[in-house]
Amino acid sequence: MKKITILILLLTVIISCKSTSVGNTKLDNKTERILKGNWIISGVNFPGSNYINVTSFNLGDSKCLINSEWSFISNNNKGEMKLNNSSSVCKDYSSPITWYINKEGNFVFKFINNYKAKEVNNGYVLDIKNVSETSFDLVDKINVAGEIKNITYTFQRK
C-alpha cells in the first residue's frame, strides 16, 4: 500500500509539472483575415527619400517595391510577392512567402523561395498600422546617419 501511495504521489507531481507549449504565436486572426487577398505597394516613404537610397528586404532600392504585388492567404499564412518594376535599377523578383501577426501585433514574414519555411532562418518583423479593408501600412526601422527612422510601405487592395 505504501508503494502505491508513493507511486500515485510521484505521478501527480510529474503530471502537474508537465510544461505546456503554446505552439501558436498568432493572436490577431481578425487582422490576418482583413489582409487576406491581393495588394500592391502604392508608396514607400521615409525621411530623406528624395536624397538617399534604402535597400528594402535585401532586394534592392526601396522605390523598386512600388507597384509590387503581394498576396496573403490567412488560413495557412502563405502568400507570394512579385517585384515588377523593371528598370536599370530594379530587377524582377518573385517568391512565395510565409507571414503572420505575432503576439506583439507585428507583421512577420519571410521569403521562402524553393525552401520549406522551417528551413529559412531570416525574416522581417514590421509594425502594422492603419489597417482597413482597403489599405494598411507596414513600418520598418532604418538607420539614417546614425538615427533610427521609420520607413513606411503603404499597401492598397488590388
Image: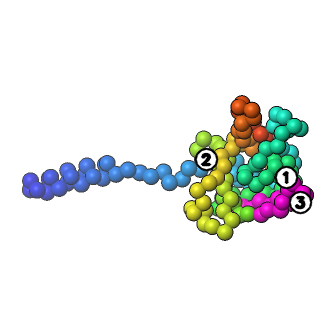
Tell me if I can see residue 132 in this picture: no
Decide whether residue 76 is among the magenta residues.
no
Q: Which residues are magenta?
A: 77-94
Tag 1–tag 2 contact (CB < 8 Å): no
Which residue is painted at 76% across and 54% down in the image? 59
Q: CA distance from mark 3 to mark 2?
A: 33 Å
Percent of width and height locating residue 94: 77, 63
Toward the viewer: 100 or 4?
100
Residue at the spot of label 3: 86
Q: Amino acid at mark 3?
A: Ser
Q: Which mark is residue 102?
A: 2
Kindly indicate the quadrant of the structure image that contains residue 99: bottom right
Tag 3–tag 2 contact (CB < 8 Å): no
Residue at the spot of label 1: 64
Decide whether residue 80 is among the magenta residues.
yes
Percent of width and height locating residue 15: 30, 53
Tag 1–tag 3 contact (CB < 8 Å): no
Q: CA distance from mark 1 to mark 2?
A: 27 Å
